[in-house]
Amino acid sequence: MDNVNHPVHYAGDKQIEVIDYIKDTLTKAEFIGYCKGNVLKYVSREALKGHKEDLEKAKVYLQWAIEAYPEMECEKTKATINIKCPDGFEEAFKKAYAKGGIVTQGKGFC
Protein backbone atom coordinates (compact mmCIF):
# COMPACT_ATOMS: atom_id res chain seq x y z
CA MET A 1 0.00 0.00 0.00
CA ASP A 2 1.34 3.43 -1.00
CA ASN A 3 -0.52 6.24 0.79
CA VAL A 4 1.35 8.90 -1.16
CA ASN A 5 1.16 7.82 -4.82
CA HIS A 6 -1.69 5.30 -4.95
CA PRO A 7 -3.87 5.39 -1.83
CA VAL A 8 -6.17 2.37 -1.87
CA HIS A 9 -9.02 4.28 -0.19
CA TYR A 10 -9.35 6.57 -3.24
CA ALA A 11 -9.54 3.88 -5.93
CA GLY A 12 -12.71 2.17 -4.72
CA ASP A 13 -14.33 -0.72 -6.56
CA LYS A 14 -13.84 0.85 -9.99
CA GLN A 15 -10.03 0.88 -9.71
CA ILE A 16 -9.85 4.38 -11.19
CA GLU A 17 -7.86 6.87 -9.21
CA VAL A 18 -9.75 10.00 -8.29
CA ILE A 19 -6.83 12.21 -9.37
CA ASP A 20 -7.21 10.89 -12.93
CA TYR A 21 -10.91 11.77 -12.91
CA ILE A 22 -10.16 15.23 -11.49
CA LYS A 23 -7.47 15.90 -14.10
CA ASP A 24 -9.80 14.83 -16.91
CA THR A 25 -12.68 16.95 -15.58
CA LEU A 26 -10.89 20.24 -14.83
CA THR A 27 -9.23 22.61 -17.26
CA LYS A 28 -5.43 22.76 -17.11
CA ALA A 29 -5.58 26.02 -15.14
CA GLU A 30 -8.12 24.60 -12.69
CA PHE A 31 -6.07 21.43 -12.25
CA ILE A 32 -2.92 23.41 -11.50
CA GLY A 33 -4.87 25.50 -8.97
CA TYR A 34 -6.22 22.32 -7.40
CA CYS A 35 -2.69 20.91 -7.09
CA LYS A 36 -1.34 24.14 -5.61
CA GLY A 37 -4.13 24.15 -3.04
CA ASN A 38 -3.22 20.63 -2.00
CA VAL A 39 0.46 21.57 -1.75
CA LEU A 40 -0.52 24.37 0.64
CA LYS A 41 -2.75 22.01 2.63
CA TYR A 42 -0.14 19.31 3.11
CA VAL A 43 2.72 21.69 3.87
CA SER A 44 0.58 23.64 6.35
CA ARG A 45 -0.52 20.60 8.34
CA GLU A 46 2.74 18.65 8.19
CA ALA A 47 3.88 19.44 11.73
CA LEU A 48 0.51 18.63 13.27
CA LYS A 49 -0.67 15.58 11.37
CA GLY A 50 1.14 13.66 8.65
CA HIS A 51 4.72 14.77 9.18
CA LYS A 52 7.03 13.38 6.47
CA GLU A 53 4.17 11.68 4.60
CA ASP A 54 2.39 15.04 4.21
CA LEU A 55 5.54 16.57 2.73
CA GLU A 56 5.77 13.64 0.32
CA LYS A 57 2.13 14.21 -0.69
CA ALA A 58 2.85 17.92 -1.23
CA LYS A 59 5.77 16.94 -3.47
CA VAL A 60 3.53 14.70 -5.59
CA TYR A 61 0.93 17.47 -6.07
CA LEU A 62 3.66 19.97 -6.93
CA GLN A 63 5.08 17.57 -9.52
CA TRP A 64 1.63 17.11 -11.10
CA ALA A 65 1.25 20.89 -11.33
CA ILE A 66 4.68 21.22 -12.92
CA GLU A 67 3.89 18.49 -15.44
CA ALA A 68 0.60 20.15 -16.43
CA TYR A 69 2.09 23.65 -16.69
CA PRO A 70 4.03 23.42 -20.00
CA GLU A 71 0.88 22.30 -21.78
CA MET A 72 -0.66 25.70 -20.94
CA GLU A 73 2.20 28.00 -21.94
CA CYS A 74 2.03 30.10 -25.05
CA GLU A 75 4.61 32.30 -26.66
CA LYS A 76 3.62 35.97 -26.78
CA THR A 77 4.91 36.34 -30.30
CA LYS A 78 2.83 33.45 -31.62
CA ALA A 79 -0.32 33.82 -29.52
CA THR A 80 -3.49 34.93 -31.20
CA ILE A 81 -6.17 35.99 -28.81
CA ASN A 82 -9.65 36.31 -30.18
CA ILE A 83 -12.17 36.58 -27.38
CA LYS A 84 -15.12 38.80 -26.64
CA CYS A 85 -14.19 40.79 -23.57
CA PRO A 86 -16.54 42.21 -20.96
CA ASP A 87 -16.52 45.99 -20.54
CA GLY A 88 -13.17 47.21 -19.29
CA PHE A 89 -11.44 43.85 -19.63
CA GLU A 90 -9.89 44.57 -23.02
CA GLU A 91 -8.05 47.64 -21.72
CA ALA A 92 -6.87 45.75 -18.62
CA PHE A 93 -5.72 42.91 -20.86
CA LYS A 94 -3.70 45.23 -23.08
CA LYS A 95 -1.98 46.80 -20.08
CA ALA A 96 -1.14 43.45 -18.47
CA TYR A 97 0.00 41.96 -21.78
CA ALA A 98 2.26 44.95 -22.44
CA LYS A 99 3.89 44.40 -19.04
CA GLY A 100 4.42 40.68 -19.73
CA GLY A 101 1.64 39.51 -17.43
CA ILE A 102 -0.75 36.64 -17.81
CA VAL A 103 -4.42 37.44 -17.99
CA THR A 104 -7.10 34.87 -17.32
CA GLN A 105 -10.72 34.88 -18.29
CA GLY A 106 -13.08 32.00 -17.94
CA LYS A 107 -11.25 28.72 -18.36
CA GLY A 108 -8.33 29.90 -20.49
CA PHE A 109 -4.83 31.23 -20.11
CA CYS A 110 -2.59 33.41 -22.28
Image (spheres, rainbow, N blue to C red):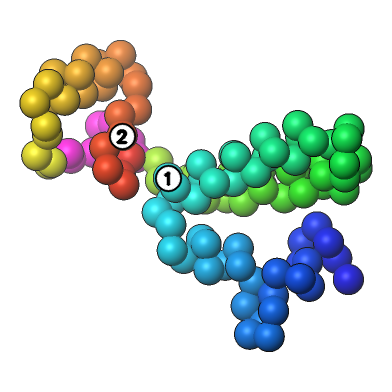
**Magenta stretch: dominant SS?**
loop
Task: Say whether residue 53 is left or right of residue 99.
Answer: right
Q: Which mark is residue 104?
A: 2
- Residue 5 occupies which quadrant of the picture? bottom right
Secondary structure state at the residue bearing disc 1: helix
Q: Which residue is mark 1?
A: 29
Secondary structure state at the residue bearing disc 2: loop
What residue range appears in magenta? 74-81
* Residue 71 in sight: no
Q: Report if residue 80 lies within the magenta region.
A: yes
Instruction: Residue 37 in the image: state x and y as whole percent.
Output: 60, 40
Residue at screen point 34% across, 28% down:
102
Q: Report if residue 67 lies within the magenta region.
A: no
Residue at screen point 51% across, 42% down:
33
Question: Which amino acid type is shown beneath numbered disc 1?
Answer: Ala
Judged from this view, the residue extending furthest toward the bottom is: 13
Task: Say whether residue 55 is left or right of residue 109.
Answer: right
